[in-house]
């Protein structure tokens, strides 16, 4: 690693440089680590008083809820958090926390009852289910035709699996640093926060998912999965745009939200194979080495080169999970993420994940 001073600005006579990796859209660069496969499980249509408990989701799955119509509350017993959702809200629980979704009219004693999957549940509130072809329809309304249209609440529930996630906490740098709950609002005041055009697009996507699930037409499962995946990326983008430096939530997303740190992280993601030095990254960030180190430690709790090492291994794990007839060799993947030899890559991978790259590929 070079110990010289940061690169000096180019003189006026210097030629204009070509576009640099820092100009790459940060979220696009993060895409390999944020690829998701959504499963839309239930379309819920409720009126009156109702409640449903959701157990913790493991195995790298995250839970989500899309509130298309009405309002409800979500209680997370593990953190003692209670969230109020309104029409147009998207709730993501990145770490699959157990939670209770219930009507705002649910009596306080019922809302505060000890968490137990299924209690309060279907029998208590007369909830029944039936398949629609693309998902389960869950409702406490009569089975008569047209009753569903009279529902006060329309809620879509599902799960997302992250491509680079695993059952070991922290193996995916981005996933591990997302908060326990992430809410993006597209209605009312939230629409102003998101932006009118963006809010309208997200709300229409939610409505379309609901219509597809209710109709159960051919191809509905594929269409709704694609829409849900796009909604998740938009939700993370809004989280990134609203993230503030110095907040308690330290993450790579916060680094990307910071103008200087974001330049350095974007450069890493755009060219992970480059032999980056602290001087190089400081030059990309247009700051000094000491300032960059302080910035990374304050926002993410790790040094710039530690962040680079973690991102490289997360990208490698994503490449190893790929399937198809033209798989890259371990040597090629090692070179793509900046390792000079396959043995050095294998040692680093095993230290991080507890298994060798070949074992990860077979798994």
Image: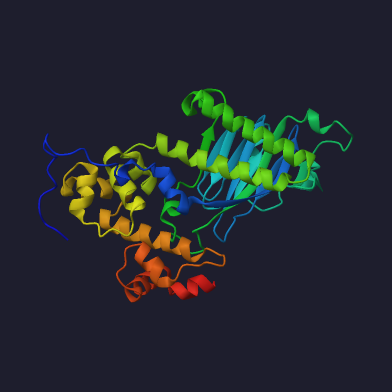
In the depicted structure, whether residue 360 falls above or below residue 173: below
Q: Which quadrant of the figure has residue 11?
A: top left
- As drawn, the residue found furthest toward the right would be 144
On the question of residue 328 being in view, the answer is yes
In percent of the image, x 57 and y 65: which residue is there? 324
On the question of residue 97 being in view, the answer is no
Q: Position of residue 187 (x, y in %)?
A: 57, 26
Q: Position of residue 193 (x, y in %)?
A: 47, 27
In percent of the image, x 16 and y 49: which residue is there? 290
In the depicted structure, whether residue 325 falls above or below residue 135: below
Along the horizontal axis of the image, is 288 left or right of 30?
A: left
Q: Position of residue 204 (x, y in %)?
A: 63, 30
In percent of the image, x 45 and y 46: which residue is there? 179
Along the horizontal axis of the image, is 71 left or right of 144?
A: left
Image quarter (top left, top right, bottom left or bottom right) of the N terminus: bottom left
In the depicted structure, whether residue 41 falls above or below residue 183: below
* Residue nearest the viewer, comparing 122 with 190: 190
* Residue nearest the viewer, comparing 202 with 183: 202
């Amino acid at each position: 690693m070079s110990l010289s001073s940061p690169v000096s600005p180019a003189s006026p006579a210097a030629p204009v440089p070509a576009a640099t990796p820092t100009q790459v859209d940060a979220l696009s660069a993060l895409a390999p680590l944020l690829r998701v496969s959504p499963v839309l499980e239930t379309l819920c249509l409720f009126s009156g008083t109702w409640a449903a408990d959701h157990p913790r989701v493991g195995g790298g799955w995250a839970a989500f809820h899309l509130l298309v119509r009405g309002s409800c509350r979500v209680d997370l017993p593990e953190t003692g958090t209670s969230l109020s959702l309104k029409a147009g809200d998207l709730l993501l629980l990145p770490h699959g926390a157990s939670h209770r979704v219930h009507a705002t009219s649910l009596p306080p004693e019922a809302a505060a009852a000890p968490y137990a999957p299924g209690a309060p549940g279907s029998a208590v509130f007369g909830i029944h289910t039936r398949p629609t072809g693309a998902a389960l329809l869950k409702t406490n309304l009569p089975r008569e035709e047209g009753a569903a249209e009279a529902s006060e609440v329309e809620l879509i529930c599902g799960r997302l699996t992250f491509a680079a996630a695993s059952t070991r906490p922290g193996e995916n740098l981005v996933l591990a640093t997302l908060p326990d709950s992430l809410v993006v609002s597209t209605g009312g005041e939230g629409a102003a926060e998101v932006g009118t055009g963006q809010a309208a697009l997200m709300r229409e996507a939610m409505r379309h998912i609901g219509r597809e699930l209710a109709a159960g037409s051919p191809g509905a499962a594929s269409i709704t999965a694609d829409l849900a995946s796009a909604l998740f990326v938009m939700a993370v983008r809004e989280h990134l745009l609203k993230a503030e430096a110095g907040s308690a939530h330290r993450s790579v997303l916060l680094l990307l939200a910071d103008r200087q740190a974001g330049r350095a992280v974007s450069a890493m993601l755009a060219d992970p194979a480059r032999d980056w030095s602290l001087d190089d990254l400081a030059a990309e960030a247009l700051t000094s080495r000491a300032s960059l180190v302080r910035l990374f430690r304050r926002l993410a709790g790790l040094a710039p080169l530690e962040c680079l090492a973690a991102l490289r291994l997360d990208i490698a794990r994503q490449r190893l999970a790929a399937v198809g007839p033209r798989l890259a060799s371990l040597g090629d993947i090692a070179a793509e993420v900046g390792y000079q030899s396959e043995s050095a890559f294998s040692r680093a991978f095993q230290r991080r994940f507890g298994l060798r790259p070949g074992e990860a590929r077979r798994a």
